[in-house]
Amino acid sequence: MKSITKICCIGAGYVGGPTMSVIAKQCPEIQVTVVDINKDRIDQWNTNDLDTLPIYEPGLKEIVAERRGKNLFFSTEVDKAIDEAQMIFISVNTPTKTYGKGKGQAADLKFIELCARNIAKVAKDDKIVVEKSTLPVRTAQAIQNILDNTGNSVNFEILSNPEFLAEGTAIEDLIHADRVLIGGNDTPSGQAAKDALSAVYEHWLPKERILQTNVWSSELSKLVANAFLAQRVSSINTISALCEKTDANIQEISRAIGFDSRIGPKFLNASVGFGGSCFQKDILNLVYIARSYGLNEVADYWEQVIIANDYQKSRFAENIISSLYNTISGKKIIIYGWAFKKDTNDTRESAAIAVADALLEERAEIIVYDPKVSEERIYADLDYLNTRSPEENRRLLKVTNTPIEVTKEAHAIAILTEWDEFKTYDWKTIYEQMLKPAFVFDGRRLLDSATMETIGFNYYKIGQS
């Protein structure tokens, strides 16, 4: 197979944007075009003010500044890019279905299918199609079926190349990847396609880190990797609940078990719960697949990871309500952090959304501060729940960019994202401004208990009595 010189990526989101930027940086001889039908999003990618790119990732704007206009392009001309590319990445949204069969668990593949039909319509020569979105197993087969029945007598090879990016460290994760997984058919043309994609990654990664598998193994490995990580988070969080009832300290337990070389220290930080676009969605996919094959015990086992995560969020909200004497109606509560974790502006499945929703149900007056998340995004997240009318969400919840001033006359502060700046605040001043008793609920174990208690706060830290 001749070497790849033109790549197109359909979807300019959290996966497509950073992945293609890094490929463009590491492969200067390859022309990379990222396309999206959302004109506003493409305009944001093409903006002169690199601080307003649609995605915030440390290191991303520098790469975009260096490569954009040279071999990295952002465009709404989807058909033109498909036509010219030898390799097409599909990186569109695959949300969990909110309707019909598999509602709440199965992935909604309508955007993937629209992509495949569009590729089939436009393509005049052979293409390698790479699925990059988080997908349920067997999607490659569906894409292949659509592409094979186009009547254009074009040859398509479908590869699965799941992403393993952690938001906040996506650029680092791409440049120094633990492994790259490439799944494809074990036919001569399938092997050639796998080698062609491998050659792209070999520009900057050692060949032994690029694993080739069959399509099913590749697709399932992605779901299983996230399920195992999420399982660790839920496991430690269930123990944090036990610690709060006893005199154990979750940090000491995490450290003690993390020293066991068979367990290791990663993903053992207790918190208000995991968020993000992948953990919950991938486990729900795993649950759905297991159920569809009649493996109910397998499905129940993995579903428990999500149940435990939801429990952690609701437990945190319940604790705020009970600590404030079971009535928070009209009380001013400040939420620090809306993103699902620090160093990203992504809010998908963020714990803050669930906690805010529970407090709003009790008619609290909430003020939210997050250094990277926009006011529009915060309201969109709440409106999406359909718990209340958009007007009521805007009446009860306000967004601020002055995190210290808004604590005047507040009853409580809840820390829901582990932004480093929260550690640097003048908590003495905050205490003096708040109504007494002044409560801080630390859902990220960010601050020092002794210091906060010395200042005078009623300070609650997840995983400590």
Image: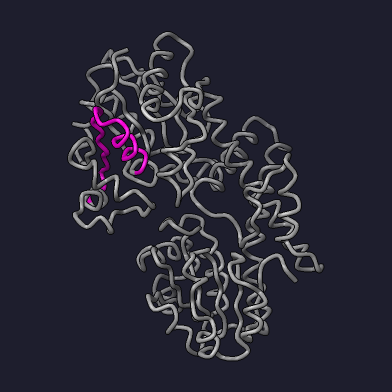
Picture coordinates of residue 147 (x, y %)?
35, 22
Q: Is residue 86 above or below residue 295?
A: above
Q: Is residue 364 left or right of residue 113?
A: right
Picture coordinates of residue 37 (x, y %)?
25, 43
Report whether residue 430 is seen: yes
Residue at 42% of width from left, 8% of height from top?
188
Residue at 44% of width from left, 60% of height from top?
384
Residue 178 versus residue 339: which sits nearer the camera? 178
In the rendered image, the residue lying farthest to the top is 188
Residue 263 versus residue 246: which sits nearer the camera? 263
- Can residue 440 be found in the magenta stretch? no
Image quadrant holding the C terminus, namely bottom right
Picture coordinates of residue 446 (x, y %)?
58, 67
Residue at 81% of width from left, 68% of height from top?
247
What residue range appears in magenta? 18-39
Quadrant of the rendered structure where residue 88 is? top left
Picture coordinates of residue 214 (x, y %)?
52, 20
